[in-house]
Image (spheres, helix red, strand yellow):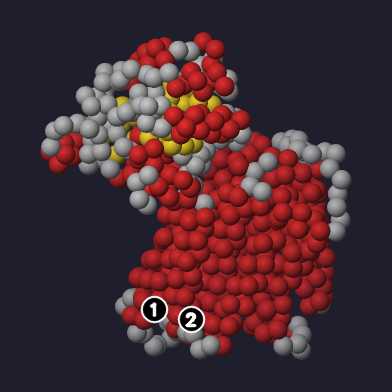
Amino acid sequence: MSQHSQFTLLKERRFAPFFWTQFFGAFNDNVFKTALLTVLTYDALTWTTMDVGLLNNLIPGLFILPFVLFSATSGQLADKFEKGKVARYVKLLEIAIMAIAAYGWMSKNIWILVAAVAGMGIHSTLFGPVKYAYLPQHLRSDELVGGNGVIEMGTFVGILLGEILGAMLVVHKPWGVELVAGGCILIAVLGWLFSLRIPVSPAPVPDLKINWNPATETVRNISFSRKNRPVFLSLLANSWFWFYGAILLAQFPLYAKDYLHGDHSVFVLLLTIFSFGIGAGSLLCERLSGHKVEIGLVPFGAIGLSIFGFDLYLSSLMYTNTAAVTAMSFIDQVGSYKILFDIFMIGIFGGLYIVPLFALIQTRCDPKHLSRTIAGMNIMNALFMVVAALAAMLMLKQGFTIPQIFMATAILNALVAIYIFSVVPEFLMRFVAWILIHTVHRVKGINVDKIPDEGAAVLVCNHVSYMDAIVIMAYSPRPIRFVMDHNIFKIPFLSWVFRTAKAIPIAPAKENPWLMEKSFIDVAQALHEGDLVCIFPEGKLTRDGEINEFKGGVMKIVERTPVPVIPMALRGLWGSLLSRDKGNPFHRSFRRGPFSRLELVVGEPQDPEKISPESLQQQVKELRGDWK
């Protein structure tokens, strides 16, 4: 895979116009909403006699409501029509909404502005499925994580800048209202101009018959997603992040005012730090994942969300200042840096959590159903955010302080993470693999893009250590069914891991002929279902670092199910702690040193009709070379 920078995508037409279209949409949403909320907070009497607290809760609710009502329809539209065209029509709708809102601003008609909030919610609902279904059509698999990271970074930066600009413009005297009205129209026009450059994105299901009933379509979408368990649980995990974030961000205004004793600038500072953390974490995903979809980062992100969420509670207890402060004077207070650090790290780990989930959904979901799946996810996100608001209200009613709400959310996040990762252990196993190859070893993959993104194949590799499978798993774009010795498969606790990972135990014919035959049947079934199967044809770990004779099992497999056979070789693992080198294990570890290098080399796919155990052994030897 090419080791490119994700930022180079911003120079390419297949990505840049779409990025800026999305950016200006998020930017405009928040300029408008923040300006309206600021006016209602600081100048309510000249606009309305209604209760301001009611309006401040009504406006975010009206923005979220269209996600529940219209996401199912928007997902169908994105699957049925060319996505560039859908984006352009959505941008024209945004211009019309902002024009209507401008009349509301100039006439000081609060209900027109409230209606425009609902309109912008519809705009975002229609654009949401296009946003994530567009990327897999135009980005390579090794660009998908980086592209998602840049999109998430742009979204949160757009939200942050929009909130700052909206609050600044509307209080500008004497032209605040006029600046907001004209500025929102200008931003909408900029987004539309960029949308004109979005390249053609063919509709995956142009003959789709639209179901205009959102309730039945929502049920149908979720039912379809549930058939693909990893995708469905990724949708739930994604929605959980919005639950976590909604509770956290909803507490920031009162947290800044009542606990940090700060003015509005302190709230803006907290929001800024969090947004930059999300952006940095989103961008960091590409580097940490090695330009591939690395779902092992999801548990890493979940752990960080719980640790730093709990630490934010502890840091809040250590903050003792009671004098009123601005953002600048807050920074000078004892304990302020710890609070800001915790909030920044929550943002970092939030980015590490969310970006791989989006990439997994995009790569594992049926392309013909992707937009509708994203639409279903948006409905779930909205519902989780509503539940988050109710949960926060319940905790406050029960006497929880805001720092205690941070603590409770962090603990709840840990429980949810344990459940998700126990139900889909692939997340946890990829996390263990990611940790090992980024701590004990520095692993380099060579030609790993030859491992297919889809379709059945048999992977064959030399067997050097007990962590061979982990290294191979870490570089595979999707799950692998490993064929392993039945005695290792039975090891307590590890047996659960192997079983949930769908490993296939095998025994020699002289030990258990029934199990051996069953293993080949299971392998044939896995290949029939389009899975990757990996075997170690030597049948045992090497005792001297050399490659042992390849057994004939691979021939029995491809005779039953003719699929491509991909030779691979591990370099640098001989002599490691988990190999069978007879030397002193501690001496070997110190001799190799920390972060010892090793490589996984992948060869060209082989025609199953032209292979033999001898030819595969020779190819693996050539791939490995002299480096054991």
Give me the C-alpha separation between circle 1 and circle 2. 9 Å
Residue 91 x %, y %? 76, 52
Q: Quadrant of the C terminus?
A: top left
Give the residue at x 16% y 39%.
585
Residue 622 in view in this figure: yes
Could you say whether the residue bearing mark 1 is in a helix, strand or loop?
helix
Question: Is 259 above or below relative to 154?
Answer: below
Q: Is residue 187 visible?
A: no
Which of the pair 18/31 is nearer the observer?
A: 18
Q: Which residue is mark 2?
A: 402
Up/down of 243 relative to 435, above or below: below
Residue at the image position 51 percent from the left and 23 percent from the top:
557
Where does residue 121 sit, x and y in percent of width and height?
Answer: 74, 63
Q: First in sequence, mark 1 or 2: give its number.
A: 1
Q: Nearer the viewer, residue 368 or 517?
A: 517
| Amino acid carrying mark 2 in the image | Ile
Mark 1: which amino acid?
Ser
Residue that appears at 72% across and 88% down: 51
Decide which of 608, 477 is in the foreground and name it.
608
Residue 247, horizontal then vertical, whole percent: 55, 72
Give the number of the disc on residue 316. 1
For the image, the number of numbered tags is 2
Residues marked 1 and 2 touching at CB (< 8 Å): yes
Residue 620: image location, x then y, percent: 37, 19
